[in-house]
């Protein structure tokens, strides 16, 4: 697959970090903030941090109170990323992307487009066609059957923040989460008939987290450049 926005390519390897277990959301945010601050000072390089969270909801900067349907179900955390409510939990690969766009391209749309291409490329490793939809953030899978009603399910969410041209927050790919956990929110504010959420396993692909990580790594190197 061709790179979606080649000016974001870098020959300098970004660190690929994978954390075992489940990382509390406040801890992850604190570590991201510290890393981004150190990047601004030139003390550390770029990093892609892969992890899992315990079950929780986050409210992005555009979150609407009415989209939190069950506030007692899981902890709810405000988030500085763009977007609305989203769910994180076991079986979902969260990737926090800390890149220095000053050294790539100072173009937020280009950066988001490349994140989308990264996810779509990883899904392609499993023979899954990830698609984009106008007006809907994230990556979708068309599950409409011939002659049947529309059904499109979201398999990955994107929510980023850029501070002085350094990115943080990132993407969430559903590998094998409990999809019922999404029922406590209106995911990303989308409640249209025929739209839902899915995962690699729900689509009939018994993918492990390690296999998902390997696909993400391969696709990353096609889109953004080498990894350390």
Image (spheres, grey):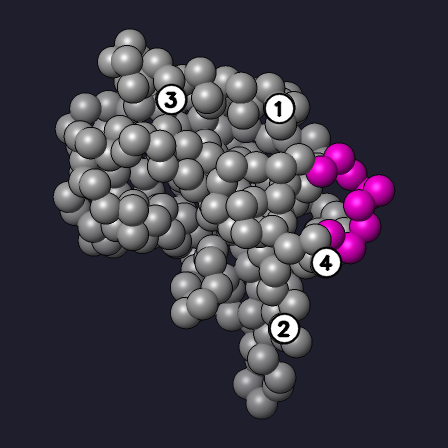
Q: Nearer the viewer, mark 1 or mark 2?
A: 1
Residue span colored magenta: 68-76
Q: How many residues crowd around disc 3 within 10 Å: few (fewer than 14), some, or many (20 or more)? A: many
Name the one closer to the observer, 121 or 187.
187
Q: CA distance from mark 4 to mark 3?
A: 32 Å
Q: Nearer the viewer, mark 4 or mark 3?
A: 4
Q: Is residue 110 left or right of residue 150?
A: left
Q: CA distance from mark 2 to mark 4?
A: 15 Å
Q: Which mark is residue 192?
A: 2
Residue that lies at the very extreme toward the bottom in this rendered image: 147
Magenta stretch, overall SS: loop
Residue that lies at the very extreme toward the right in this rendered image: 72
Name the one closer to the observer, 30 or 54.
30
Q: Earlier in the sequence, mark 2 or mark 4?
A: 4
Q: Which residue is mark 1?
A: 26
Q: Which residue is mark 3?
A: 36
User: Which quarter of the picture shows residue 216?
Assistant: top left
Which quarter of the rendered picture does the N terminus lie within?
bottom left
């Amino acid at each position: 697959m061709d790179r979606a926005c080649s000016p974001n390519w870098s020959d300098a390897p970004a660190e690929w970090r994978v954390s075992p277990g489940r990382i509390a959301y406040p801890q992850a945010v604190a570590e991201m903030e510290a890393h981004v601050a150190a990047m601004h000072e030139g003390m550390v390089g770029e990093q892609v941090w892969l992890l899992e969270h315990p079950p929780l909801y986050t409210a992005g900067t555009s979150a609407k109170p009415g989209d939190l349907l069950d506030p007692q179900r899981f902890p709810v955390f405000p988030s500085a990323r763009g977007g609305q409510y989203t769910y994180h939990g076991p079986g979902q690969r969260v990737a926090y992307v800390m890149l220095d766009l000053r050294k790539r391209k100072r173009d937020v749309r280009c950066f988001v487009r490349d994140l989308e291409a990264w996810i779509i490329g990883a899904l392609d490793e499993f023979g899954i066609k990830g698609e984009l939809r106008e007006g809907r953030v994230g990556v979708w899978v068309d599950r409409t059957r011939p002659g049947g009603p529309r059904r499109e399910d979201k398999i990955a969410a994107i929510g980023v923040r850029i501070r002085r041209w350094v990115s943080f927050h990132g993407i969430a790919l559903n590998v094998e989460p409990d999809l019922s956990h999404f029922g406590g929110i209106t995911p990303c504010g989308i409640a249209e008939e025929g739209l839902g959420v899915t995962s690699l396993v729900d689509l009939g692909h018994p993918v492990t987290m390690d296999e998902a990580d390997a696909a993400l790594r391969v696709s990353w190197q096609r889109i953004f450049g080498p990894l350390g």
